[in-house]
Image (tube, grey):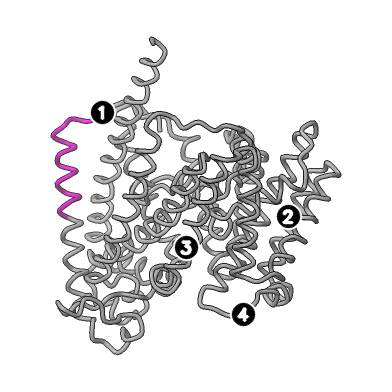
Amino acid sequence: MGIKTSLPAAELGLYSLVLSGALAYAGRGLLEASQDGAHRKAFRESVRPGWEYIGRKMDVADFEWVMWFTSFRNVIIFALSGHVLFAKFCTMVAPQLRSWMYAVYGALAVVGTMGPWYLLLLLGHCVGLYVASLLGQPWLCLSLGLASLASFKLDPLISWQSGFVTGTFDLQEVLFHGGSGFTVLRCTSFALESCAHPDRRYSLADLLKYNFYLPFFFFGPIMTFDRFHAQVSLAEPVRREGELWRIRAQAGLSVVAIIAVDIFFHFFYILTIPSDLKFANRLTDSALAGLAYSNLVYDWVKAAVLFGVVNTVARLDHLDPPQPPKCITALYVFAETHFDRGINDWLCKYVYNHIGGEHSKVIPELGATVATFSITTLWLGPCDIVYLWSFLNCFGLNFELWVQKLASLSEQTSRRVRAVFGAMNFWAIVTYNLVSLNSLEFTELVVRRLLLTGFPQTTLAVLFVTYCGVQLVKERERTLALEEEQKQDKEKLE
């Protein structure tokens, strides 16, 4: 963020004290609310018996998370373990063929999970975009890619194509949309890179190796084709010093996060409470603010665990995948509000940066953000909630540019003033994303309580606590930036 000015240690200490006290107070309110509501009729479907030996029930409202670690746990472990073992064997025996092994194993896993007709459906989309890439027209490739994506998001084509899946199971819809959507994005990336580099002559085999890499297939993250092809084509990949230790640390962190979420859901029913608006309306203002914040933190943890597991496998395969999503706690500008860095990189490279240029002019930036969020709306699935979410985030991103154009402040005052705007931005980000994560009704309740009926005491208190958090995040970013500069200077001297 370019932060160079530090604040006095006493001031930062005060911010830490205020933030930790506020989080503890809000957490206490949520804990009491969860205990009071554990036996409500409205909670029966999503609060089930958990640790019976201490009488704790568990929030199971997120069926995806529950399925990952119950009925689908063994399947996931078996599939990823098989991939790692075959990849290791192939790397030792014939490293030049490892990309083929990835593709064949991934295709077989897709057939075993979704059936052969689903594989043929995706192959049809792959071939269509490959043929388009041969014409060398980027606008045609992007248009065809968006049309393919729309066919998986809009009726009647989505209903027809979903019929290609063999059998029925709990996560079928999630896997169908994940595999199909990411396939289209990967194929579009391949086509656009082929147009940008006609001298490299990429083949259909290169596209299939790229698309059917199993760890990325269903849930991402997505690597653009140029990055994936360059890394997977190395005949004799070599690990950097200390990389295996970092891979073990990442795997261990994912396990710790899974255990922490399991413990958390036995005490805090943050996913069930928003579904009961009468009960949620009884919460104190601090507990309601904590509930809204914790919902977004959970969504980040869920994505971080998913990408952490996948990225661990990818790093074992000598790939450098996109980083896990940035924590919601560290987000106070719309320009960095993305949970999936891979999709964000894809959108920035092929749409946002292409139209917006240097992002310094208002009109091109408006066009770039409108185009980017239009594609994002298509990716998420067009509906009223997604339209509202996209509009609000698009407005927030442009509003930041307008403020930057008008504001010109000195160093130390600038940091404090920007933190005030950052606090307001943070809650704008939270409320805008609650629309898609929970419901419009719950979002309206949060906004009404925190901004209208709670004004001015609750509003100012929440903003001040958030301001303290933003300042602490800024200080952390400043420290990391200085450490990186010192590291680079040391490497230059050596």
Query: Where is mark 4, residue-wise?
Result: 167
Looking at marks 3 and 4 on the same chain, the residue that comes earlier in the sequence is marked by: 3
Can residue 398 be seen?
A: no
Which mark is nearer the camera, 1 or 3? Answer: 3
What residue is at 19 percent from the left and 37 percent from the top? 12
Q: Position of residue 234 (x, y in %)?
A: 61, 33
Report, in whole angstroms, how far the alpha carbon at label 1 lies from the one at label 4: 60 Å
Query: Where is mark 3, residue-wise?
Result: 78
Give the SS element for disc 3. Answer: helix
User: Viewer-proximal residue, 477 or 441?
Assistant: 477
The amino acid at mark 2 is: Gly
| Horizontal relation, residue 276 to residue 342: left or right | left
Report, in whole angstroms, how far the alpha carbon at label 3 lies from the one at label 2: 33 Å
User: Is disc 4 in contact with disc 2, using a CB cutoff of under 8 Å?
Assistant: no
User: Is disc 1 in contact with disc 3, using a CB cutoff of under 8 Å?
Assistant: no
Q: Position of residue 427 (x, y in %)?
A: 36, 55
Query: Where is mark 2, residue-wise?
Result: 145
